[in-house]
Amino acid sequence: MEQKQEYDEHFKIILLGNNAVGKSCLLRTYCDRTPCFDEYMDTMGVDQEIKPINVFNKRVLLRIWDSSGAPKLQNIVASYFRFVDGALICFDLANRASLSGAKEHVARLRTIRNDIPIVLVGCKSDLKKRREVTSKQAKELADELGSDYLEVSALNDMNVEQLFTQITLQIYLSKQLNKIKPTLDKCFNNFLKLNNPNRAKLFTEQHQSSPIKGEIRAEYRAQFAKLFVSRRVDEVTEFCRKTLDLIEKTNYFYKQESPVLSSFLTSPLSNALKDILDVLNSMLGDMMGFTAANELIYQKKSIEHAL
């Protein structure tokens, strides 16, 4: 008897876009490794394909939904939105109107799921002579949507596998950040309390009321707000590096303001920041292996001194 395959994660991805932009061909090339040619059949509602993939040394099963772009079927398509973990927003590089259609599909999706990763996909990149949408125009829309952009050709099998790997990585990272969000929120609230100039306690907070500490608080609040929309590992590691810089800055001013206390106590603000860093480092370690994660995070010259 064949042993049942076990998977670490199960993700649902939906392909959105106008009719005839190349969604079905893209999916067929990815799942069946058979290229599409010029034949076209309209998807009636939503079709499904299943595909296993490995990311971050994890076995992931993708359930991929290919949706119709027909306006009369959009209510059926929208009924799938609350179940999806990510979306590929497709348009035809040889059809300028389909780019506007992609924006409309994103707007409908985000009325129900505003928090999931999306990638804008320029299909039919092999049709160079018929191209109506430039890379610059597409990237401008991707920036407006807050998404990555990738051009693919199902006919030539160009960037197809890379596209599905990219969205799967983004989904995985997003889910990991959501899992640790309650812990990070708690650490962040502790950080804000310690940096409250209206509070003062011996040996812990009285030195934290300087304007410089207020600047650190404002700087970190802005960084923290961006963390949970990170879609790439390098964005999370950059957050970690900036946090290390703030730890170094906090420790420096702590020594300047409290030379006696700093000789036997660590800055409470520094401790709160380090708690956040430890949680993120643990997450990256689980995803990539601790050695790889540490190499990414601790590469600045000032890191060892900061800790």
Image (cartoon, helix red, strand yellow):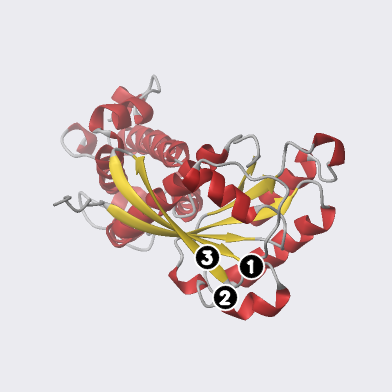
Reading the chain from its start, which is encountered first: label 2 or label 1?
A: 1
Q: Is residue 19 left or right of residue 228?
A: right
Q: Which residue is rendered at x = 76% and y = 55% of the image?
A: 99
Q: Which residue is rendered at x = 28% and y = 49% of the image?
A: 272
| Above or below 160: residue 11 | below
The residue indicated by pointer 1 is 68
**Is residue 191 visible from the viewing direction of this image?**
no
| Above or below 191: residue 235 | above
Dots 3, 1 in contact, CB < 8 A: no
Q: Residues within 10 Å of mark 3 (few under 14, many from 20)?
A: some
Disc tally is 3
Q: What's the CA distance linking mark 3 and mark 1?
A: 8 Å
Which is more foreground, mark 2 or mark 3?
Answer: 3
Q: Which mark is residue 47?
A: 3
Q: Is residue 21 left or right of residue 28?
A: right
| Above or below 32: residue 249 | above
Q: Is residue 266 left or right of residue 127?
A: left
Q: x, y (%) of residue 219? A: 49, 47
The residue indicated by pointer 2 is 78
Name the residue furthest top: 301
Front-most of 46 and 92? 46
Reading the chain from its start, which is encountered first: label 2 or label 3?
A: 3
Front-most of 180 and 157? 157
Element type at mark 3: strand
Residue 245 is drawn in which quadrant?
A: top left
Q: x, y (%) of residue 213? A: 42, 47
